[in-house]
Image (tube, rainbow, N blue to C red):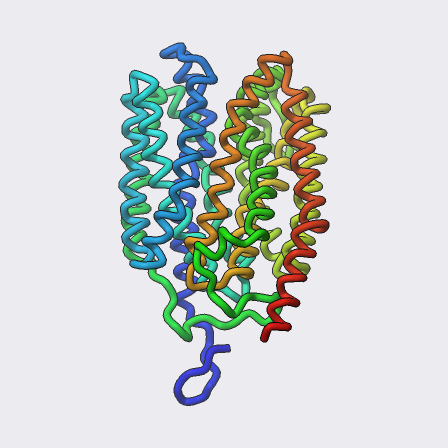
Amino acid sequence: MPVDTSGRAAQPPARRWLQLVVGIVCMVMIANLQYGWTLFVNPIDQKYHWGRTAIQVAFSIFVLTETWLVPVEAWFVDRFGPKIVVLIGGILVALSWALNSTAATLPVLWIAAAIGGIGAGAVYGTCVGNALKWFPDHRGLAAGLTAAGFGAGSALTVIPIQNMIQASGYEATFLWFGLGQGLVVFLLSWMLRAPRPGEVPPSTRLYQSTRDYTPVEVVQSPIFWVMYLMFVLVAAGGLMATAQLALIAGDFQVAKVPVTLLGLTLPALTFALSIDRVLNGLTRPFFGWVSDHIGRENTMFIAFALEAIGIWALSALGHDPVLFVVLSGLVFFAWGEIYSLFPSTCTDLYGVKYATTNAGLLYTAKGTASLLVPLGNVLMAQTGNWRAVFIVAALMNAAAALMALGVLKPMRTARRQAMAAAE
């Protein structure tokens, strides 16, 4: 516990929970930029006939700019604080979807995707980094709760967006949802700040570095690149499912088939999208909390192995509407935890001072993984079905699971022992 000037143990300030809540709400407001995108692909194609692959380039551009520019945005956060970066992010988020509403050519759609990616990345990287700094004692849980806002944030808006697209067109949906989401982020940004010395309690459970490593030192570390590769392997399959789920449901001929689960009856695709958003959000704090107790690598092994099984099962059994809903939920539940486990592990290893920038460097792996999303369409076109895509994704997750225990854990243990010997 931190100690005040009188020598009494200071209690963790309640304001850190306010910071966490503000960060979560901001993440909710940017979630539709990624997870709502699949709902707009077919309407755009029906109007302009650009083709799915060309339209999905916008999704890849969004993910690339959302991830690869986070280290730059994070540098400003670590230097000037989180407020200004999130404020600008909110403006860009609104501008992006406003442009989407009027895009009559592919280049405009792609430019809007880039603007949205920059804005979403500014919000995402800042809010996750802020949580890592405020909660060293519950780092996995705090990062998971924050990332859950992004994973589950679109769950409540799936049906409203679908209904508005049908009633008013996708153009009006882009415009009004974009303006509303951006405005909320803009207003909440004024409440964000980084912790001051002595405001947060230390961690007493998991090993955490007492030294703060600069971003240059981090990218020179072999452990960083092991984590980067694992991140890419796991993220690729989840991104494919996120971008292509509506298309997969259509090709499996289950999209509009009514499914009854949990007392609700909805078309299979609508049901899957809603459940997927919830589970993709719940997994982040759940596995983050688990990792706070049993260790990061052990948790990674469990989650990544479960993801491999889920992807394989979806390819084999997903033609059944009920199993399509259930198994797509399993895939998202076993995928979303990467956004709590990897930032937490990175900050445990490399310290707090540059946590936002260092976690942002690792987060660029998501952008690298997004390059594989269009290749899924190509592979599907070559083979005539989604089976080969699913098998490749399942094998990548199985490889990451084995690397967690067979490569990452021994490397971290050896590094910790070497540092202890040096001290």
Residue 393 percent location from the top left of the image: 64, 31
User: Closer to the camera, 143 or 191?
Assistant: 143
Residue 241 percent location from the top left of the image: 57, 29
User: Closer to the camera, 127 or 68?
Assistant: 68
Please indicate whether residue 131 sits to the left or right of residue 281 in the image: left
Q: How many marks?
A: 0
- Which quadrant of the view contains residue 6? bottom left
- Which quadrant of the view contains residue 290? bottom right
Residue positioned 47% across, 26% down in the render = 38
Residue positioned 29% across, 58% down in the render = 80
Residue positioned 42% across, 40% down in the render = 68
Please indicate whether residue 52 sits to the left or right of residue 421 in the image: left
Q: Residue furthest bottom?
A: 6
Residue 363 percent location from the top left of the image: 48, 45
In this view of the protein, can residue 73 be seen by the observer?
A: yes
In this view of the protein, can residue 20 be seen by the observer?
A: no
User: Closer to the camera, 119 or 20?
Assistant: 119
Vertical relation: 35 (above or below) 56 = below
Residue 77 percent location from the top left of the image: 34, 55
Vertical relation: 346 (above or below) 8 = above
The C terminus lies in quadrant: bottom right
Q: Residue furthest top?
A: 49
Residue positioned 71% across, 44% down in the render = 402
